[in-house]
């Protein structure tokens, strides 16, 4: 095979001599052959990552052939690799100037311009590229993109209009134009873009949702409602439209709004995530307020969720949340356990189960469940903490300590959890009658939260065991002053001695 056919395409573009009359390739001179060999050497060094050597080779080509666009282009890429963007831009500009018909040089230079925040220049290059290849859709989008970056949104819209003349009105250009019109404060024009899209695709429900959402964003509630009603005419089972129409009551009467969602929750064809997404803010509010009326309305909906989607772990999880925050932990526990039977890989549900067992002082189940959780989540510090807490509750401090020590390692970046772990570790040492170690550990917890009354109370017990009755009394009194209300604490202060 002739050596010249191995040369890169760009090199051939720059160096090949065209026959004057019949279009045949003229013989390559010795000087041109030498330039080609230097160019190839430069590309070899570039591929090996020898950037400085590659740069030297391409410069040598330019010394011998001062307007070799291919060499200048490759030199620009080398400078970019060397992070010398200014020189890369200069070399890239030369390549474009010396061979303006080559689209790759312009494409590359435009990207370089973006790196140095010369978006206006990049936009101009893509304008040229569109003229060179008016059927390349990608060029139009890039042109508009750089126009937007250079604060020329109106010009970008013109580009999208130009593209639509070629390919027709479509979702992508419409979304871009609508966003630009909104940014320019041209709300009527923004709305018209979506209306035009609907006019072309009248049966596409998604485009009507786009329009309804636009009306919601611009505060045109009546138009949004009308659009959602049109959607339901096209698709009577459209859950999002039903929910949106129910939203008319949102903020005015939360209970009425939640009750209006019942038909949506009864529909097995409506995606469960859509249903849950709509009520999550109210579940969070229930957790914060404990509002019984809100809880009962949510309970009705989440019970429907469990009935309609019995095999979805999420339905049992959210019902468990509502029951828990509605003051029914035993029923919540039942739902959480059903959730875990369907999907064991949701840590948040395990954590809720562990918390309920702790709150019930069911230490045997707390230990068993925490160990089951640790099989799946060995790096969850709360699982180790609850495991240690359960063993302490069973008066097995020797079993508790390894779990608590592991929790202490993992909880380094979680001060609230670390405080609880230290406090429980101190409890283990207290049960083992290692009072000096208990004193040190509880002292570390004190640094994190010096106003915890349960901690102060236990620190007082440790001091008493160490023969420091006066220090113990001061700690008990401090706990009482900070709101400690246990009868046991009051007796300690009153009698000035440890009362178990």
Image: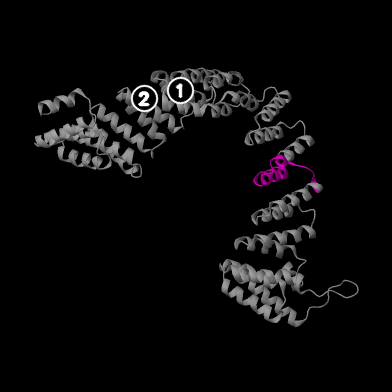
Quarter that holds the C terminus: top left
Pointer 2: what residue? 356
- In the rendered image, which quarter contains the N terminus? bottom right
Q: x, y percentage for residue 92?
A: 67, 68
Question: Residue at left 79%, top 59%?
Answer: 131
* Magenta segment includes 467: no
For residue 441, above or below residue 49: above
- Answer yes or no: is residue 43 visible: no
Q: Position of residue 287 (x, y in %)?
A: 43, 27
| Residue 452 drawn at (x, y percent) | 25, 34
Query: Residue 209 has which mark?
Result: none
Q: Residue at x 25, y 26 (%)?
A: 394
**Which dot, 2 or 1, sits closer to the camera?**
1
- Give the quadrant of residue 430: top left
Chain part drawn in magenta? 166-190
Q: Would residue 233 appear left or right of 411 to someone viewing this image?
A: right
Q: Is residue 492 left or right of residue 187?
A: left
Q: Out of 120 and 265, give the one closest to the viewer.
A: 120
Element type at marker 2? Answer: helix
Dot 1: what SS?
A: helix
Residue 190 vs residue 36, the one in the foreground? 190
Disc 2: CA contacts within 10 A as few (<14), some (14-19) or many (>=20): some
**Does 184 appear in magenta?**
yes
Q: Earlier in the sequence, mark 2 or mark 1?
A: 1
């Amino acid at each position: 095979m002739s050596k010249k056919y191995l040369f890169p395409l760009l090199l051939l573009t720059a160096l090949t001599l065209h026959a004057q009359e019949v279009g045949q390739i003229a013989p390559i001179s010795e000087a041109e052959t030498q330039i080609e060999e230097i160019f190839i050497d430069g590309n070899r060094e570039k591929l090996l990552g020898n950037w400085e050597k590659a740069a030297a080779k391409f410069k040598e080509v330019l010394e011998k052939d001062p307007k070799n666009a291919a060499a200048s282009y490759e030199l620009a890429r080398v400078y970019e690799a060397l992070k010398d963007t200014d020189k890369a831009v200069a070399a890239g500009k030369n390549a474009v100037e010396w061979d303006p018909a080559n689209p790759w040089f312009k494409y590359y230079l435009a990207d370089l311009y973006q790196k140095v925040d010369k978006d206006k220049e990049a936009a101009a290059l893509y304008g040229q590229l569109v003229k060179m290849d008016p059927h390349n859709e990608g060029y139009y989008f890039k042109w508009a993109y750089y126009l937007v970056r250079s604060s020329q949104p109106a010009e970008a819209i013109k580009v999208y209009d130009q593209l639509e003349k070629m390919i027709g009105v479509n979702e992508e250009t419409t979304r871009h134009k609508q966003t630009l019109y909104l940014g320019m404060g041209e709300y009527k024009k923004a709305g018209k873009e979506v209306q035009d899209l609907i006019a072309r695709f009248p049966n596409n429900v998604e485009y009507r949702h786009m329009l309804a959402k636009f009306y919601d964003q611009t505060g045109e509630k009546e138009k949004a409602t009308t659009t959602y009603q049109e959607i339901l005419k096209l698709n009577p089972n459209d859950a999002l439209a039903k929910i949106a129409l129910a939203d008319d009551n949102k903020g005015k009467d939360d209970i009425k709004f939640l009750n209006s969602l019942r038909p949506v929750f009864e529909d097995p064809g409506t995606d469960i995530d859509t249903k849950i997404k709509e009520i999550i803010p109210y579940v969070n509010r229930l957790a914060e307020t404990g509002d019984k009326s809100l809880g009962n309305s949510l309970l009705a909906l989440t019970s429907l969720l469990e009935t309609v989607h019995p095999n979805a772990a999420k339905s049992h999880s959210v019902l468990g949340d509502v029951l828990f925050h509605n003051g029914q932990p035993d029923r919540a526990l039942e739902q959480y356990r059903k959730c875990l039977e369907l999907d064991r890989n949701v840590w948040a549900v395990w954590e809720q189960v562990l918390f309920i067992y702790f709150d019930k002082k069911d230490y045997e189940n707390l230990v068993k469940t925490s160990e089951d959780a640790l099989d799946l989540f060995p790096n969850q510090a709360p699982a180790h903490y609850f495991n240690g807490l359960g063993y302490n509750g069973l008066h097995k401090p020797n079993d508790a300590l390894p779990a608590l020590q592991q929790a202490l390692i993992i909880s380094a970046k979680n001060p609230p959890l670390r405080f609880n772990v230290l406090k429980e570790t101190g409890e283990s040492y207290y049960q083992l009658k290692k009072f000096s170690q208990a004193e040190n550990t509880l002292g570390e917890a004190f640094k994190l939260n010096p106003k915890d009354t349960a901690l102060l109370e236990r620190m007082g017990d440790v001091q008493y065991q160490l023969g420091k009755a006066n220090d113990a009394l001061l700690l008990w009194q401090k706990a009482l002053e900070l709101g400690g209300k246990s009868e046991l604490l009051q007796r300690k202060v009153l009698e000035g001695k440890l009362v178990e």
